[in-house]
Image (spheres, rainbow, N blue to C red):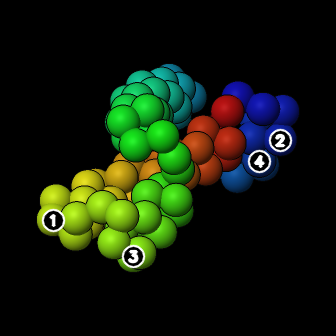
Amino acid sequence: MTNLAVQVFERHPLPVGINTLRGILEDAQGKARAFEQIIRGFEERYGCDLAGFEARIEVGELPEHPAWEESIEWGVAADELKRLQDTQSILG
């Protein structure tokens, strides 16, 4: 944990132990790696990031089906990765 997190927890103790918080952090790190792999897989398959992929769908370069479904899955993975990174920055 960062010094800031330790200072905050010392001043404002939570009803959970440090080991529980470490477990949450480790879980977040593992899940983040999984979402990074999903995102990397899409990027390698299509040779672009999510915004580029969605732009290709919009101009008709890719068929809407199943491309929109994949963009939704890709977007969910990106959102979850961001959420997990935020969690890690708070606890890490």
Q: Which residue is mark 3?
A: 58
Q: Which comes sooner in the sequence, label 2 or label 3? A: 2
Label 1: how many residues lie within 10 Å, few (<14), some (14-19) or many (20+)? few
Q: Amino acid at mark 3?
A: Glu
Q: Quadrant of the C terminus?
A: top right
Q: Earlier in the sequence, mark 4 or mark 3?
A: 4
Query: Do the numbered discs 2 and 3 sit on residues whose CB atoms are within 8 Å?
Result: no
- Callout 2 secondary element: helix
Q: Is residue 6 above or below residue 11?
A: above
Q: Check the image and report above or below for 15 versus 72.
A: above
Callout 4–callout 3 Cβ contact below 8 Å: no
Q: Seen in the image, is 7 located left or right of residue 53?
A: right
Marker disc for residue 4: 2
What is the three-letter code of the residue carrying label 1? His
Callout 3: SS: helix
- Which type of secondary structure does the marked residue at label 1 adopt? helix
Q: What numbered label is drawn on residue 8?
A: 4
- Left or right for 36, reference 72: right
Query: Does the residue at mark 1 contact the one at mark 3 (Cβ under 8 Å)?
Result: no
Residue 71 picture quarter: bottom left
Q: Amino acid at mark 2?
A: Leu
Disc with the residue nearer the chain's start (2 vs 1): 2
Three-letter residue code for mark 4: Val
